Amino acid sequence: MIGPAPYYNDGLDGVSCTSGRNCLAVGWTDLVLNLDCPAGYAHCLTIVAVVERWNGHVWQALSGMPMPAAPTTGGPVRSGRPGPIASDGPYTKFSAVSCATRDSCEAVGQWGSDRSHSTADSLFADRWNGSEWRLQSLPLPENASDAVVDAMSCRRASCLAVGSYTASGHSQPLVERWTPDHWTRLAFSARKQAAHAVLTGVACGTAWGCEVVGRTGGSGSTQNPLAVAWRNGRWTWQPVQTPPGSRARHGTGFVAVACGSARSCYAVGDYHKRNPLTGFDASWFTERL
């Protein structure tokens, strides 16, 4: 879908459809900047955000979306049309997209000053209003690094985006809300289990009612699936039943959620179960919330 050389690797991380003839998929591609790179392609690449649209027949790459200012070039870049970026120069990548209608879509991603992520990442968004894309910024704590949005859901003129960031060496939950004119960072639940939670999925039935899922605990700790409802600005934790025999272990939790209505949602995730031969086996499970 994304295209032939000089693209090296690529991937799509999110998709949203308003009908069978209108879908947006977002992701990234490694773009080779110097075909004669003496150190090999892997040392002369940059990551560029990409957007593809489905019209019911074929996928088409979109270009010209505004991207954040490039630190090494001193000016903005556009998706699909990168400028003279250094081989270790700025990267942009989309990680989630959601369309409330055909003429109202939001794509979010991350950008940084080099491809190796050695500097703190920042978040950005592009909003489609039916006639043009407009660049937006998302607020982050001053000490945040490695910020990423894993999922987003939009209803009418409102969106809720969830993910995580790193602060003082620990993972922290991230919740951002878009209202008609700006992004606002929301405080997540004050519960002790939420301190180092990783949020991976969100589905909104209304502009003020969303289901958020993920896992508790940080990297290297025991983790369990979590499900929290956001209703009218308040967080409500919901009971979660993991399959019999499952063990709290790194990676155990929900990865996505979908809602057919405001009161009917299903979450999917993975868990670990002890195996006398291999130690632990990973499997998946679903749960109605």
Image (spheres, helix red, strand yellow):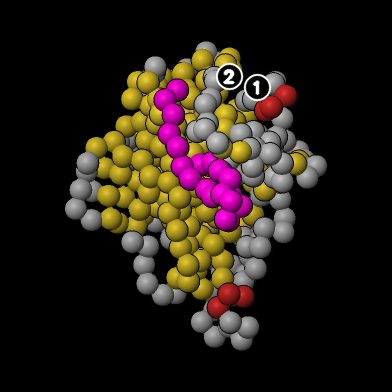
Q: Residue at x 63, y 62 (%)?
A: 115
Label 2–label 1 contact, CB within 8 A? yes
User: Is 124 displayed left or right of 207 in the figure?
Assistant: right
- Figure quadrant of residue 1: bottom left
SS under mark 1: loop
Q: Which residue is mark 1?
A: 189
Which kind of residue does numbered mark 1 sit on? Answer: Ser
Q: Main secondary structure of the magenta part?
A: strand
User: Is 41 displayed left or right of 72 in the figure?
Assistant: left
Depth check, front residue: 139 or 171? 171
Q: Residue at x 48, y 71 (%)?
A: 8
Q: Residue at x 20, y 48 (%)?
A: 56
x and y, in percent, of residue 52 in the image: 35, 53
Look at the image and tell me whether residue 115 can be seen: yes
Within-10-Å neighbours for mark 2: few <14, some 14–19, many 20+? few
x and y, in percent, of residue 95 in the image: 50, 47
Within-10-Å neighbours for mark 1: few <14, some 14–19, many 20+? some
Q: For the residues marked 2 and 1, what is the alpha-carbon distance in whole angstroms?
A: 8 Å
